[in-house]
Structures are given as C-alpha cells and as structure tokens.
Image (cartoon, grey):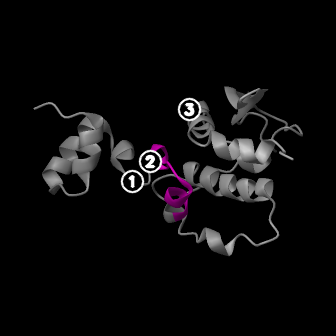
Amino acid sequence: MNINKETAKKLYSESPGWFREQLEAEFGADYLDPNYWENIKTLDDACAKLKIDFSELINEYDTPDERAYKMLKIIIRAINTDRSGKTWVPDFQNGDQKKWYPWFRVLSSGLGFSTSLCTYGHSAATVGARLCFQTQEQSDYAATQFINLYEQFLIVKM
C-alpha cells in the first residue's frame, strides 16, 4: 500500500499503536508530530504549541511593525522548540554555533526572500537575536511561510 506524506499525517493521530509505529518508521516521528516545526503554518499554530494567548501580548498602542515583531518572536520560538518542549536559543558567546536568519531584498512589489545566512560569533544591527534559527531549513521555511509578517516588521509604510 502506498501512502503519501500528507495522508500519513492525517491518519497518524487516529491510528492504532502498531500502525503509528509503521508510519513513524516510514515518515519519521518528527514529521508526523503536530508540534513539528513544519506544521506551524500560522500564528495560531505557534500559539497553540507554546500555549500562549497572543491577545495578552498586544495592546492598542502597538504599531504594525511592533505587532509583527511580537508575532515573529512567537512563531520563531515555536519553530525552534522541539517535540520535548526544549527551545533552542542562540548562544552568542559560542562562536562555533551556527545561527541562521533570513535575508530579504526590497522589490517594487514588496519584500522578496533572497536566502538564509549564517553567523557564528557575532550579530549585526540587521539581525534580531530573537529571530535566529538553528538550521537553514527552518530559516528558509519561516521566511517563505511568513514573508508577509517579515514585510510588516521590516518595511515602514507611510
């Protein structure tokens, strides 16, 4: 029987133990886990994973870029949190640790994702320490999945 990844993900939570084990062996437990970082497609997904009520973190005085920054911090924290609930945090004292962040270019049509960059021992004014990822794959994913939020955060519109 052939099952694709999306079907496996749908079947996983309702399957008996032996079938879940088969699905995990074929597709990986991380991929099938609803808390896996690629399953974070919205702010609501990130809030659910971290058990956060976003409405408690914002106020009427937040500007659009401040609101977007708060959203990105939550999303990035959720992406950087593994199945066990442990959150990867960049250690800027560790010059050997890779820290990935998306790099954008401003286009006439808005913001365009260029690539993910890596830094080992320093940060720059263009990089928010709370907006780093453990892997390039995570950085690329967040940059493309949440490009509208990055645009709200990075580009001031008058």
Residue 23 higher or lower than 75, as above or below = above
Q: Toward the viewer: 55 or 84?
A: 55
Residue placed furthest toward the left: 1
Residue placed furthest toward the bottom: 56
First-in-chain label (3 vs 2):
2
Residues packed near mark 2 inside 10 Å, few (<14), some (14 to 19) or many (20 plus):
some
Amino acid marked by disc 2: Asn
Residue 49 higher or lower than 18, as above or below = below
Left/right of residue 70 with respect to residue 138 in the rendered view: right
Q: Quadrant of residue 127?
A: top right
As measured in the structure, the alpha-carbon distance from the residue carrying label 2 to the one carrying label 1 is 6 Å
Q: Is residue 39 magenta?
A: yes
Asked if marks 2 and 1 touch (Cβ < 8 Å), the reply is yes
As measured in the structure, the alpha-carbon distance from the residue carrying label 3 to the one carrying label 2 is 14 Å
| Residue tagged 1 | 34
First-in-chain label (3 vs 1):
1
Check the picture and name the quadrant holding the N terminus: top left
Question: Magenta residues, as a range?
Answer: 37-47
| Residue tagged 2 | 39
Residues packed near mark 1 inside 10 Å, few (<14), some (14 to 19) or many (20 plus):
some
Residues packed near mark 3 inside 10 Å, few (<14), some (14 to 19) or many (20 plus):
few
| Residue tagged 3 | 137
Q: Quadrant of residue 15?
A: bottom left
